[in-house]
Image: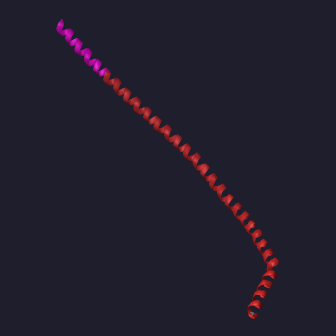
């Protein structure tokens, strides 16, 4: 009876070991499946984030190009106004400059 009780105990130990191996293998399989699912989910989130950021970038680029066109027009207009002011100043002071130069030339020749 003791021999069969010992053999029975060994059989129970072997069965328990096999059950433990099955549990470990199942846990590894579940872990691998969760990792694959997490990777797939992360790739989806990365793709969505990339698409969102690309959309924002394209919006900024388009706003920047229209903004620079508006800036160019504004600067062109401001430059035109400044050039007109300078030309008006030249017309207004032209006679004064001519008179000053004439005085200077006349005074230098007779001196």
Along the line of sight, the residue nearer the viewer: 57 or 86:
86
Q: Is residue 2 left or right of residue 78?
A: left
Residue at the (76%, 94%) spot, across then down: 110
34 relative to 61 in the view: left or right: left
* Residue 86 pos. (x, y %): 76, 73
State whether residue 61 is above or below residue 52: below
Q: Residue furthest left?
A: 3
Q: Quadrant of the N terminus?
A: top left
**Residue closest to the eye, 69 or 85:** 85
Closer to the camera in the image, 59 or 86:
86
Coordinates of residue 39 in the picture (x, y in percent): 46, 38
What is the span of residues highlighted in magenta in the rendered image? 1-19
| Magenta stretch holds residue 4 | yes
User: For residue 6, which quarter of the picture?
Assistant: top left
In this rendering, the count of numbered labels is: 0
Query: What is the chief secondary structure element of the magenta stretch?
Result: helix
Residue 72 falls left or right of residue 47: right
Task: Name the residue located 53 percent from the left edge and 44 percent from the top edge.
Answer: 47
Please determine whether, in this image, residue 80 is positioned above or below residue 97.
Answer: above
Residue 26 lies, with reference to residue 63, above or below; the image says above
Q: Nearer the viewer, residue 98 or 89?
A: 98
């Amino acid at each position: 009876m003791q021999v069969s009780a010992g053999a029975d105990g060994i059989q129970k130990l072997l069965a328990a070991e096999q059950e433990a191996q099955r549990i470990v293998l199942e846990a590894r399989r579940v872990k691998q499946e969760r990792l694959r699912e997490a990777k797939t989910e992360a790739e989806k989130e990365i793709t969505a984030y990339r698409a969102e950021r690309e959309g924002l970038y394209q919006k900024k680029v388009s706003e920047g190009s229209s903004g620079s066109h508006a800036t160019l027009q504004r600067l062109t207009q401001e430059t035109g106004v400044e050039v007109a002011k300078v030309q008006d100043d030249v017309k207004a002071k032209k006679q004064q400059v001519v008179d000053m130069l004439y005085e200077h030339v006349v005074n230098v020749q007779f001196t």
